[in-house]
Image (cartoon, helix red, strand yellow):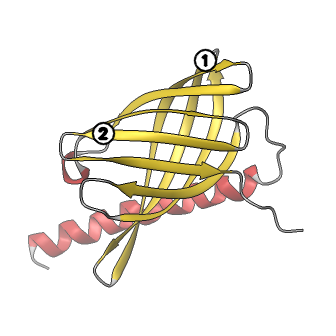
């Protein structure tokens, strides 16, 4: 196998491993009641830079005080192939009445665009977030998933 094919195969396996872990946690979180902004979120991401977009899921859990752990799972279309891209980030989430403010940053690696910075606002039913990196910027729009009965 040539080095490029080997590298792409390893990258695909890493993504699949991250996706299965996220999917398992996503299903487990469906059994828990949402508290504040904690819990499951679903929506879309949109790049204002290149007009790419796709589905987005997020799990939010409180770590300590105003620090929350967020797990994102974005889907990105590469021609005929759709790639799932999971990543984790700690965010500072503060509450003022019924409104929450979000702020964080994550290094997604050189291939994905490097360091992304996030900020936004939301409620217990909707989150609107902006992201910015050196070569990309856009939005996340999230809401609570409609649970099937």
Is 12 located above or below residue 39 in the figure? below
At x 90%, y 68%, the residue is: 149
In the image shown, does 65 or 9 lie closer to the viewer? 65
In this view, the residue farthest toward the bottom is 80
Residue 127 at what x, y percent from top left? 59, 42
Please identify the quarter of the rendering in which residue 107 is found.
top left
- The quarter of the picture where the N terminus appears is bottom left
Residue at 32% across / 85% down in the picture?
80
Residue 42, x across and y down, in percent: 62, 56
> Closer to the camera, 146 or 23?
146
| x and y percentages locating residue 85 in the rendered image | 41, 58
Q: Is residue 125 left or right of residue 135?
A: right
Where is residue 111 drawn, in percent x and y? 20, 53
Q: Which residue is mark 1?
A: 66
Q: Which residue is mark 2?
A: 132
Q: Which type of secondary structure does the marked residue at label 2 adopt?
A: strand
Q: Residue furthest top?
A: 65
Q: Provide the secondary structure element on which disc 1 rests.
A: loop
Whether pointer 2 and pointer 1 mark residues with C-beta atoms closer than 8 Å, the reply is no
> Quadrant location of residue 35?
top right
């Amino acid at each position: 196998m040539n080095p490029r094919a080997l590298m792409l195969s390893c990258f695909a396996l890493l993504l699949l491993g991250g996706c299965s872990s996220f999917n398992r946690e996503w299903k487990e979180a469906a059994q828990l009641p949402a508290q504040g902004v904690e819990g499951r979120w679903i929506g879309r991401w949109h790049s204002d830079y290149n007009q790419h977009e796709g589905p987005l899921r997020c799990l939010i859990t409180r770590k300590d005080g105003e620090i929350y752990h967020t797990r994102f799972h974005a889907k990105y279309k590469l021609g005929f192939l759709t790639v799932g891209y999971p990543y984790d980030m700690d965010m500072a989430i503060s509450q003022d009445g019924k409104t929450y403010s979000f702020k964080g940053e994550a290094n997604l690696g050189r291939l994905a665009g490097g360091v992304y910075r996030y900020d936004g606002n939301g409620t217990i039913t909707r989150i609107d977030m902006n992201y910015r990196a050196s070569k990309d910027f856009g939005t996340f729009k999230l809401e609570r998933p409609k649970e099937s009965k």
